[in-house]
Image (cartoon, rainbow, N blue to C red):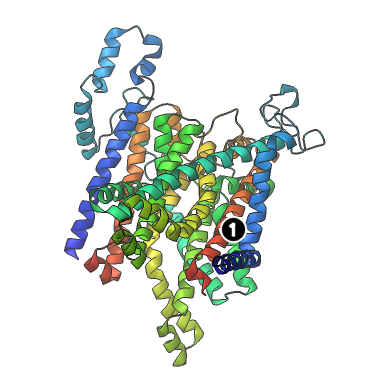
């Protein structure tokens, strides 16, 4: 009986969000594109017409046609299949970077904001130092020091991205910490970790989600840039950045590789950025009230 | 103001120290022995090996090497290149030294007013088709990586229309495409921010007052509102410049421009770490210097910054 009203309210709030989501053009277009990219990434092994890594020296630089819908590259590998599998590589790296940066950033940001003291000083000084580097150049430095490869890319990009999340989390915690319900929890003897997880986290989660969703597009872009420069994920793994580099080198004679791959990469990032913008409009109360 | 300047300049020291330490550590962590690589065919020649080790200072304890590294950098000496045997790093990079900053700064000089103009236009026509159109272009401009955009632009303007050269460096025509590629994301970013700031400013009381006393809309926008959107925009110049500097790595690689960015990438592949690290350090110093300049300008414009000194 007593639980009836809250659950009704919750359902109303949920449908309200869905309604506003559907009315938001950015969110709708963005989520449609993202959905396609995610599906492609998951289904790549089933829908790719060829093995993305199989070299066929009898079919190098085939133009787009019936055998190879988007043509082949300098080693006779099917461009379409490589684009489809490239989506998988991009999303796996973006997902891993997001998971690492959210975990590290939120935990350190909460520790800094809630406990203060030397922990805060140490964490925030580290954040300041990382911010003093141009993002991509720091990632290049790390990649150069650790050697190339998927794991290196994830480490390099995570290192660059967690400070933003940590700084945001800290500032959110600082403002929520002043609320009465936190005082009440402290007064009733709730352990600190429980206050952080049960009372603070739910109240700061939506701006963090917004920040993360806006970041996905940029993480994908940064990964592609490292691969483009040749210091990211290495051949023969198909990466959009690496494919565009190869394609640019033979743009005059065989433009299909660079153009189609650039299109796939550009559209994917546009999709993620539109979804991120849409979510920000929907979840950020400052924007919503306008 | 004086204490503010001193504080900010002193604040740079730990950042640079960390940057130097990081580059030094990165140098150490790198796999392989650079001297063995350098020796290649002469790997059995112990006398030569010892001589090279002394020349590169690699025969001393790590901690001595570290302080020596700091001391040398303070004196503008970045050590010797691994790729070009016994050639000082400074000689390797000296001819490329100015290209990346020139590219980045000229792009910024065009992107800033362009972005400001687009953002302001979108803001004053809010929710019209002009606004929607500009926003679409901005989303694309921010989202499409410069090397992906490069494939379209090079294909269209250099290969199909033959308007500009495909690559190279030295003439004005050769600079058009690379600078354009740097301008697009920067201008889009600036436009997006200036649209937001402009919309905020247009809702303030003093704009309402200006309208109430019958000022023309043009004067209100371009004289009153624009000034107050400029102030928050100024703080983002640092971020934008960071993006532009990173962009030079890509653009220089695409167009075979002999700047620091492409040199750094070549050095990474050649395992010429002293050169890579010197370039990273130079970029960081340049970046920190610009940020310092922005901070100081901001403090000059807005007294609350230099008096409060409390950063959010």
Q: Position of residue A205 (x, y in %)?
A: 46, 57
- What is the quadrant of residue A45 in the picture? top right
Q: Is residue B160 visible?
A: yes
**Residue that appears at 19% across and 35% down:** B71
Question: Can you name the residue that lies furthest to the left here?
Answer: B3
Residue under label 1:
A274
Q: Position of residue B221 (x, y in %)?
A: 47, 79
Of A172 and B54, nearer the camera is A172
Compared to residue A107, the image places residue A22 above or below, namely below
Question: Can you name the residue that lies furthest to the bottom here?
Answer: B213
Compared to residue B180, the image places residue B51 above or below, namely above
Secondary structure of residue under mark 1? helix
Q: Position of residue B134 (x, y in %)?
A: 59, 66
Question: Can you name the residue that lies furthest to the front here?
Answer: A1
**Residue that appears at 45% across and 32% down:** B266
**Residue that appears at 52% across and 62% down:** A280
Of A98 and B109, nearer the camera is A98
Callout 1 crowding tier (Cα within 10 Å): few <14, some 14–19, many ≥20: many
Please indicate whether residue B283 sits to the left or right of residue B62 in the image: right
Please indicate whether residue B152 sits to the left or right of residue B235 in the image: right
How many dots with numbers? 1
Please indicate whether residue A257 sits to the left or right of residue B191 in the image: right
Q: Is residue B259 visible?
A: no
Q: Chain of mark 1?
A: A
Compared to residue A200, the image places residue B49 above or below, namely above
Of B47 and A189, nearer the camera is A189
Quadrant into which the N terminus of chain A falls = bottom right
Question: Can you name the residue that lies furthest to the top here?
Answer: B44
């Amino acid at each position: 009986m007593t639980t009836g009203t809250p659950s009704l309210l919750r359902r109303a709030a949920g449908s309200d969000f869905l309604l506003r989501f559907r009315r938001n053009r950015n969110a709708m277009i963005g989520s449609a594109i993202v959905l396609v990219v995610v599906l492609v990434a998951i289904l790549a092994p089933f829908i790719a017409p060829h093995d993305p890594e199989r070299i066929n020296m009898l079919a190098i630089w085939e133009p787009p046609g019936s055998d190879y819908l988007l043509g082949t590259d300098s080693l006779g590998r099917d461009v379409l299949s490589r684009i489809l599998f490239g989506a998988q590589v991009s999303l796996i790296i973006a997902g891993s970077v997001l998971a690492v940066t959210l975990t590290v950033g939120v935990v350190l940001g909460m520790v800094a904001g809630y406990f203060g003291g030397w922990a805060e000083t140490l964490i925030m000084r580290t954040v300041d130092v990382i911010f003093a580097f141009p993002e991509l150049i720091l990632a290049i430095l790390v990649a150069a020091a650790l050697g190339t490869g998927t794991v290196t890319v994830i480490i390099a990009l995570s290192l660059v991205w967690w400070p933003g999340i940590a700084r945001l989390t800290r500032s959110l915690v600082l403002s929520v910490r002043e609320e009465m319900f936190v005082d009440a929890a402290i007064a009733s003897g709730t352990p600190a970790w429980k206050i952080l997880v049960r009372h603070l986290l739910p109240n700061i989660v939506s701006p963090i989600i917004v920040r993360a969703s806006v970041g996905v597009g940029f993480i994908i872009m940064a990964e592609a840039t490292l691969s483009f420069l040749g210091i990211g994920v290495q051949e023969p793994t198909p990466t959009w950045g690496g494919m565009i580099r190869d394609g640019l080198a033979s743009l005059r004679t065989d433009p299909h590789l660079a153009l189609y791959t650039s299109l796939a990469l550009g559209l994917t990032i546009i999709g993620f950025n539109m979804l991120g913008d849409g979510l920000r409009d929907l979840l950020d109360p400052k924007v919503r009230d306008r | 103001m004086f204490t503010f300047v001193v504080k900010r300049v002193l604040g740079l020291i730990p950042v640079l120290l960390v940057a130097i330490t990081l580059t030094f550590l990165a140098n150490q962590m790198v796999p392989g022995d650079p001297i063995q690589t350098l020796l290649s065919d002469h790997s059995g020649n112990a006398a030569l090996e010892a001589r090279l080790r002394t020349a590169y200072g690699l025969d001393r304890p790590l901690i001595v090497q570290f302080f020596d590294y700091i001391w040398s950098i303070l004196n503008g000496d970045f050590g010797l290149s691994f790729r070009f045997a016994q050639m000082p790093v400074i000689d390797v990079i000296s001819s490329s030294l100015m290209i990346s900053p020139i590219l980045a700064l000229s792009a910024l000089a065009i992107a800033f007013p362009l972005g400001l103009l687009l953002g302001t236009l979108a803001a004053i026509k809010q929710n019209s088709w002009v606004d929607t159109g500009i926003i679409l272009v901005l989303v694309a401009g921010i989202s499409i990586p410069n090397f992906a955009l490069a494939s379209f632009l090079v294909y269209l303007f250099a290969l199909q229309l033959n308007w500009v050269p495909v690559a190279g460096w030295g003439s004005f025509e050769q600079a058009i495409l690379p600078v354009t590629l740097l301008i697009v994301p920067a201008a889009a970013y600036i436009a997006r921010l200036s649209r937001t700031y402009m919309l905020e400013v247009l809702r303030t009381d003093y704009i309402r007052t200006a309208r109430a006393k019958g000022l023309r809309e043009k004067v209100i926008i371009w004289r009153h509102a624009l000034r107050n959107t400029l102030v928050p925009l100024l703080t983002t110049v640092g971020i934008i410049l960071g993006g532009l500097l990173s962009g030079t790595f890509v653009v220089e690689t695409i167009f075979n421009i002999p700047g620091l960015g492409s040199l750094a990438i070549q050095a990474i592949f050649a395992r010429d770490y002293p050169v890579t690290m010197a370039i990273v350090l130079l970029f960081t110093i340049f970046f920190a210097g610009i940020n310092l300049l922005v901070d100081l300008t901001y403090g000059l414009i807005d007294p609350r910054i230099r008096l409060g000194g409390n950063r959010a």
